[in-house]
Amino acid sequence: MVKFEDLADKIVTSDVLIIGSEGAGARAAIEAAEQGAEVTIVSKGKIAKCGTTIMAGADITLDGKSLNKLGFAGDPEDSEDKFFRDIVVQGFYINNQRLVRAYVSSAPARVKELLDWGLRVSSAGRREINTTGVEIMRVLAGRVRKFGNIQIVEDVMVTDLLTKNDKVLGAVGVNINTGEFMAFKSKAVVLATGGWHEAYLFNTGSAGLSGDGQAMAYRAGAELINMEMVTFCPNVILWPPIYRGSIFLYILGMFHGSLLNSKGERFLEKYHPSIVELATKTEWNKLLLSVFSMREIREGKASPHGGVYFSLKGLSKQDLENSEAFLIMPNWKFQGTDFTKLVESMVNGELMEVGPAAHYFEGGIKINERCGTSLRGLYAAGECCGGLFGANRVAAATTEIIVQGAIAGKCAAEYAKKLSNNIKVDVDQVKKLKDKVFGPLKRKEGVEPLKIKRKIQVIAQENIGVIRDRNGLKNAIEQLSRIKESELSKMCPSIKVPEYNMEWVEILEIENMTQVLEISARSALLRKESRGVHYRLDYPNVNNNYWLVEIVTKRANSNIKAYMCPITITDIKPPRRLMSFEESILKAIEICK
C-alpha cells in the first residue's frame, strides 16, 4: 500500500498555508503569525520580487477624513460612508456591500500600520497616499522576516489543493528549480495568487500570473464569481517594442496628453464633457478610455499596430517637468526604465501607439466578509477574489490587499486553532495529482506549449476583450473547449527532466489559463447587458431591471455550471431602471458629487 510519505519528495506541515507571497499573501502571513499560528508562505518566485504588487504605481486609498487624521492633506469633509457609496455606485451596484464595508472601515488602520512600519510616501491627495509597489513590498517582506513562526518556501508552483469532504487540508506542487514534488499539510489555506494576466496577449502583469488560484479553487469545488469582469488599462505602450507593455503613458496621461485615431481626430471630443473629465482625471479612466479607444479601433481607425495614438503636442519639456507626473516619476524613471528619450521625442511631435491591456480582474474566487470561501478551511485575499469592486474598480487594489490579507490571515488562524494537529490527507488524491503534474514529462512527443499559449492568448484578446458580443464569446468557448479536450493533453516539453524545466511549468500554467478563460467567457455570455468593464456590443444598455445579479460558476463533474445569484445589499439599494452606457455614467457622476 502506497503511503503519503512515499509520494512526496518533501512534506511541509503548518497551521496556515499561504499560497502567494506578495501584497495580500505577505499581509495574511503577518496577521496569522501574530495570532500565534505556524505559517508557511509558498511563492512561485522570490518574495518581494514577483507577482503584481511590485508593478503597482501605487496609490493607497482611504476616506479623506481618516487620511486627514493621519496627518495628510485629505478631504476633512469626506467620510467612510461617502467612500462606501462611491465604490458601490461606481461599481455599478453589484459589489458585495459587506466586502465594501470591510474595505472602507479597515483601510485607516491598515494604512497606519504600513506608515508605522516605515512606508515612504511620495505625495497625497484627497483620498490617497502615493508610494510604489516596490516600497509596499519592502515594508511587508521586511515585516514577514521578523517572525520566527513564518517559513518562506520560494520557487514552488502550487498546482492543486488537497481536499476531503469539502474541506481543504493543504496543497501539492513542484519545486521549479529541483523538480521535486512537494506536499503541504495545513489546517487552513489562504489563496493570494493574483490575476490571470498571462491569458491575454497584451497585458500589464508580470510573468507567472496565470490564474493558478482561481483554477485550483474551481477544481477543488469552490465557487467563483463575476468572472466576466476584466479591467483593461488604456494608454499602454504598443509601439515601439522597447517600451511595449509599459503603463508609463497611462500614468502620464492622467495629467497630460491627448488621444488621436488614425485620422488625427481627438476622439474624446465626441463625448459629454463630464464623461471626458471622469475619463481623464479619475480611476474611471481605465474603463472609459479603454472602451472609447476600442470603439475607434473597431471602426477601422486604428494605428498601424492595432491601437490609437498618444500625443503631447503643444506641451514643452518645462511644462511636463513642472507637473505632478514628474513628482510621481522623477527624471522620467518608472519601474526601472528611463523614459527620458521617449518624452523628448514626444515633445518634438512624435506620436506613440497605445492600446488597452488586460490589467485587473474584478471577478475571482467568491468570498464572504471573513474572506472565507464555499470550502471549509479555504480563504482568499486580493485580486484572486471577486465581489468587492463589482463591475468597475474605482478604489485602490493596494488597499484591497492589505485589508483582505489581514482579514484572511486572522480568520484562517482562528479556524486553524479549533482543529487538531492530526491532518489526514487522501493518499489516492495525492497520487492522482502527482500523476497529472508529471504526465507531460512522460510524453515522448506532442505539441509545443508555446503554440497553445499563443493560441489561447489570441482567443482571449479577440473575443473576451474590452468589447464583447455573442458571436465572439461563443467562438471563444468553442475554441477553448476544443483546446481543453484535445490539445492540452498533447502538450509536451522538449526537455524531459524536471529540474528547472520552464516549459513544463508553462504547461501547468496553460491548463489554468485555459480553464479561467473558458469560465470568464461563459460568464460574459450569460450576462446579457453592459455593466462597467463588461461591455457587450449586442446588449449596450445597463439593465438594472434584470441584471442586478452576481454570475456564480462552480464545477459540476467535468462541466462548468454558471448561474445567477442575488447581490449582497446592506446599505445602498440600487435603482431599478434600464439605461444606456453613457447615461449610467452620468447618473453615477450626479450621485457621487
Image: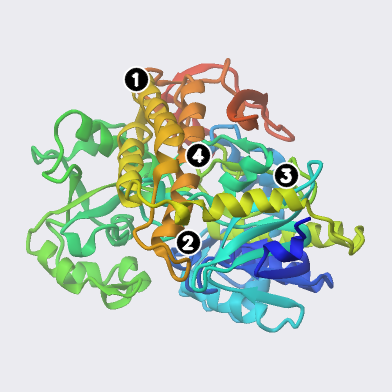
Q: Earlier in the sequence, mark 1 or mark 4?
A: 1
Give x and y (percent) for residue 557: 65, 29
In the rendered image, which residue does mark 2 sit on? 52
Cα separation between marks 4 and 2 = 21 Å
Residue in the picture at 33% in, 55% down: 254
Q: Earlier in the sequence, mark 4 or mark 2?
A: 2
Label 1 CA crowd tier, 10 Å (few <14, some 14–19, many 20+): few
Q: Nearer the viewer, residue 443 or 249?
A: 443
Cα separation between marks 2 and 1 = 32 Å
Q: In this image, 318 relative to 360: left or right? A: left
Q: Quadrant of the N terminus?
A: bottom right
In the rendered image, which residue does mark 4 sit on? 515
Q: Are marks 1 and 4 in contact (CB under 8 Å)?
A: no
Q: Earlier in the sequence, mark 2 or mark 3?
A: 2
Q: Would residue 228 be visible to someone looking at this image?
A: no
Depth check, mark 4 against mark 2: the one in front is 4
Residue in the picture at 41% in, 63% down: 502
Label 2 CA crowd tier, 10 Å (few <14, some 14–19, many 20+): many
In the rendered image, which residue does mark 3 sit on? 373
Q: Earlier in the sequence, mark 1 or mark 3?
A: 3
Q: Quadrant of residue 304?
A: top left
Q: Residue type at mark 2?
A: Thr
Q: Residue type at mark 4?
A: Gln
In the rendered image, which residue does mark 1 sit on? 471
**Is disc 1 placed on a helix, strand or loop?**
helix
Depth check, mark 4 against mark 3: the one in front is 4
Q: Earlier in the sequence, mark 2 or mark 1?
A: 2
